[in-house]
Amino acid sequence: MTAKLVIENLKNKPMRSLLSFLLIGVPVTLILTLQGLSSGMLNDAKERARGVGADILVRASSTTVGLQQSADSVTEVYLPYFRTKVPHVKQAMGVINHSINLPLVVTGMDEDEFNAMSGGFTFLAGHALHEPDDILVDKLYARQKKVQPGATIKLLNHDWHLVGIIDTGKFARLVVPLATLQHVLDTPGKVTSIYLKLDNPANIAAVVRFIDENTSLNVQPMEDYMAMAYDANNIPGLSEFIYVVMGIGLVIGFAVVCLSMYMAVLQRTREIGILKAIGGSRSFILRIIMAEAMVLGLGGTVLGILMSFGAWWLIRTLVPSSLSIRIVPLWWPIACAVTLVGAGLGALYPGLSAARHDPIEALAYE
Amino acid sequence: MNSSRAIETQDLRKTYRVGKVEVPALRGVDLQVRPGEFLAIVGPSGSGKSTLFHIIGGLTPPTAGRVRVGNVDLASLTDAGRTNLRKKTVGFVFQKFNLLPNLTARDNIAVARYIAGADGPFTKDFEEVLRLLGIDNRLDHKPNALSGGEQQRVAIARAIVNHPAILLADEPTGNLDTENSKAVLEILRDLNQRLGQTILMITHNPEAASFAHRTIRMRDGKITDAG
């Protein structure tokens, strides 16, 4: 009967109910989209890093990690050192990862070395880098910027000639010749990272120890690097930012439900009086108000989840290269809990106020 | 006090405080109602009829005096105790029907049963009462699809669904035309005669009062004629 009362109340004021669902749903969408973006972008970067096929990553000792690309660099002199002096190193490749507009990064590399290390890019159109000003872009960037081979792309105040479109998910989104990028950035002979491939992955620990003992560089197995660099907990401020958004969601849920239920209680003063006249206890009245708030919270969560699919589709359609997003079902119950807590707190005052109504005054209410 | 009485009050007083002013609504009411009696209470506005009705119905506590409904002494009841009294011991019929507008007639009746702790379909006996009231084929309509007479009959059904010891009717014909008024009064009389339902009815209408066994008159918070 409580459910029937709640449902009939919600049906009786469909616009109020829909607006409440919508307003509660917006922060749910915000939380899920933000979480989906952080998860999607970290996963995308991780998958692309994995696509290099390297066993060990070497960087300057003060280099930061993950989505942040540092300007600190390593001299290319180390490349022949790794190739000849470090045991078990089969191949050493120096690259520059330079941020254009985070998280978009242009990568300068020697394509022949990359092909040897990773098996090469999968070309969807065009061909490999031949000339110094050639550039490759992945399909997401090509789709977002609507470019085809033959187009000119202006990056870093330099005109690049688009010669090929590569499949996404392998190391780089924008690829240019290493030497040209060093020239454009005015960092001749420098790279930001050196990737090493060994003769046998069983030697990773030994090689890392050797480099660590003989150089001042930052050296890590690729698996360790990816586990650390692409863990959301290691991105400074990201968790805090998500908590802030969750807090905002809680406050919005609280405010929307409080206002909505306060209005509902005012509108239903007489009905509350009727329920009390026929024996409805304070807890019964409070239960109805809280149940209605929970339904608003649940409905808002469901709408918020649906809207997060809309956000997911929009981001993947409009800015697939700039932003990677995933649907994160694990966060649905968290967003739902945040909303329900907000809705429950928001309904408390109107609910208690309704429960305390004097039945005679409530029945006289017009 | 005599426990065989359905209702008994002794020197019942109620004073309302309006701002800093105390307004006496009942100034010492002594009333006895037998089980199965149909009693009409008449009097001008402000005579205390509704206040007496509210105290007997457990909607508000008295300021002083004693009031007993069945075996329950209302003066000693807490708010929760008065709520329990309204669940099962008294049933209300109001002038403005006071049905829940979002629920069907059936659910309006069912909600009273639910609050009293009963659930499930109506009993066969109660189905018979619904036929007697002439609303058995109108139960799936919401109040806005029912006539005033039908709404009041649904309100009567709601009031008696939990077999209350007392039915309190506050101007039950006040919003009805002559034909529907007569029908509702006949229903009340029928309930009284067939089921032995104790009924207290407030009315301004002498014709309505004539349906009762006894009529008491009130003025200035006192009973001036005990009938």
Image (cartoon, rainbow, N blue to C red):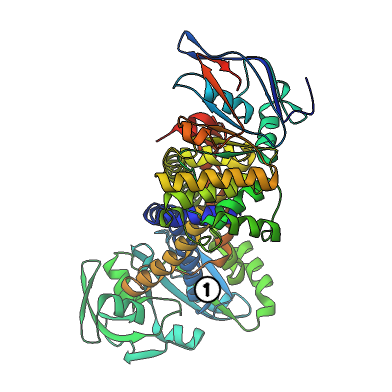
Image position of A292 with respect to A29: above or below:
above
Q: As shown in the figure, which amino acid type bears the numbered disc 1? A: Tyr
Image position of A313 with respect to B150: above or below:
below
Percent x, y of residue B125: 70, 57
Side of A4 where A305 appears, left or right: left
Q: Nearer the viewer, residue B193 or A181?
A: B193
Can you identify the residue that label 1 sits on?
A81
Percent x, y of residue B88: 69, 41
Percent x, y of residue A87: 63, 77
Q: Chain of mark 1?
A: A
Q: Quadrant of the C terminus of chain A?
A: top left
Q: Quadrant of residue A228?
A: bottom right
Residue found at x 78% / y 19%: B1
Element carrying mark 1: helix
Instruction: Confirm whether residue A248 shows in the render.
Output: no
Instruction: Confirm whether residue B31 shows in the render.
Output: yes
Residue found at x 68% / y 70%: A205
Percent x, y of residue B52: 58, 23
Q: Quadrant of the N terminus of chain A?
A: bottom right
Image position of A124 with respect to B134: above or below:
below
Side of B53 where A147 appears, left or right: left
